[in-house]
Image (cartoon, grey):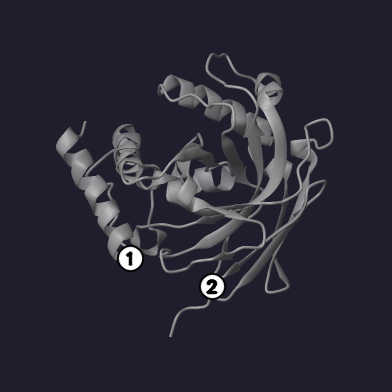
Amino acid sequence: MSGMNEVLIAAERLATAAREKVPCAPVRDLIGDAEAYAVQQHNIAARIADGATVVGRKIGLTSPAVQQQLGVDQPDFGVLLDDMAYKDGDELPVSGLLQPKIEAELAFVLKADLAEGPFDEQTVANAVGHVKASLEIVDSRISGWDITFADTVADNASSGLFVLGTEQADLGEVVPKNVSMVLSVNGEERSAGSGAACLGDPLTALAWLATTAADLGAPLKAGDVVLSGALGPMVGVQAGDQVEATITGLGTVRATFAKQEA
């Protein structure tokens, strides 16, 4: 079991990489899986102290193939802050990103708290106000995306930015596990998938998150945005790229990455 000193050292390694925009070595030499969320929470608390506000969570590692790659049997989650949020069609800054990739997801916006379990798909569905198409820009402060479960959790689940679509629907209009997704970069299709690619059903992912968040003493609340997990493979992006994703029943969500300054 790593001590608090190792947690603080790992947190500072990741925070320095983000601040100086230089990827760092993995932190798994300092912590194990059990300490990873403590590292995440430390750095999120520091960002909140600097003025950021929590607006929701993101779920990661929802693909069985990715879980197998990292040797884990469960998803993970990160915290969404207001300074990570952008609107449909916005130009996204690249100056703060180190190694960005993009994926398309369903975003659930909650209308009720999810404070007391047990939680199943129907329970969490009842708490969903509406669903939107979204783009998640994932990023890693760890050099070369050389990550294990502990590394990505500590690094706020490799979070970067996110974009919510304009259209919204309730769960009577869209069945999450049945949606189809196509993601294009600069007009070329680069990723495709379905709701079933996200733990079999994005509502299953939401139920997992509700349980885990409540167990950690930070339950989901009304108004929270939850990015439920990738519907297809993530794709590398760079300055100047134009990205759009279309999800059945939810329209198209778009974003452009700013060109690098000369």
x 46%, y 38%: residue: 54
Residue 59 spot, x, y in % from top left: 54, 40
Residue 67 spot, x, y in % from top left: 51, 43
The disc at residue 188 is none
Residue 246 spot, x, y in % from top left: 76, 56
Say whether residue 229 is visible.
yes
Question: Left or right: where does residue 15 sit relative to residue 224?
Answer: left
Residue 83 spot, x, y in % from top left: 46, 51
**How many residues crowd around disc 1 within 10 Å: few (fewer than 14), some, or many (20 or more)?**
some
The disc at residue 21 is 1
Instruction: Name the residue type under label 1.
Output: Lys
Q: Nearer the viewer, residue 136 or 62?
A: 136
Q: Quadrant of residue 196?
A: top right
Q: Earlier in the sequence, mark 2 or mark 1?
A: 1
x 75%, y 37%: residue: 177
Disc nearest the viewer among 2 and 1: 2
Question: Left or right: where does residue 208 sit relative to residue 172?
Answer: left
Q: Nearer the viewer, residue 255 or 10?
A: 255
Instruction: Name the residue type under label 2.
Output: Ala
> Quick one: which residue is furthest to the bottom in this view?
262
Q: Nearer the viewer, residue 32 or 97?
A: 97
- Mark 1 element type: loop
* As drawn, 106 above or below 240: above
Marks 1 and 2: in contact by CB < 8 Å?
A: no
In three-dimensional space, the C-alpha distance between marks 2 and 1, rounded to whole angstroms, equals 17 Å
> Quick one: which residue is furthest to the front in this view?
51
The disc at residue 258 is 2
Query: From the image, which quarter does the N terminus lie in?
Result: top left
Q: Nearer the viewer, residue 181 or 256?
A: 256
* As drawn, 57 above or below 217: below
x 79%, y 35%: residue: 175
Query: From the image, which quarter does the C terminus lie in?
Result: bottom left
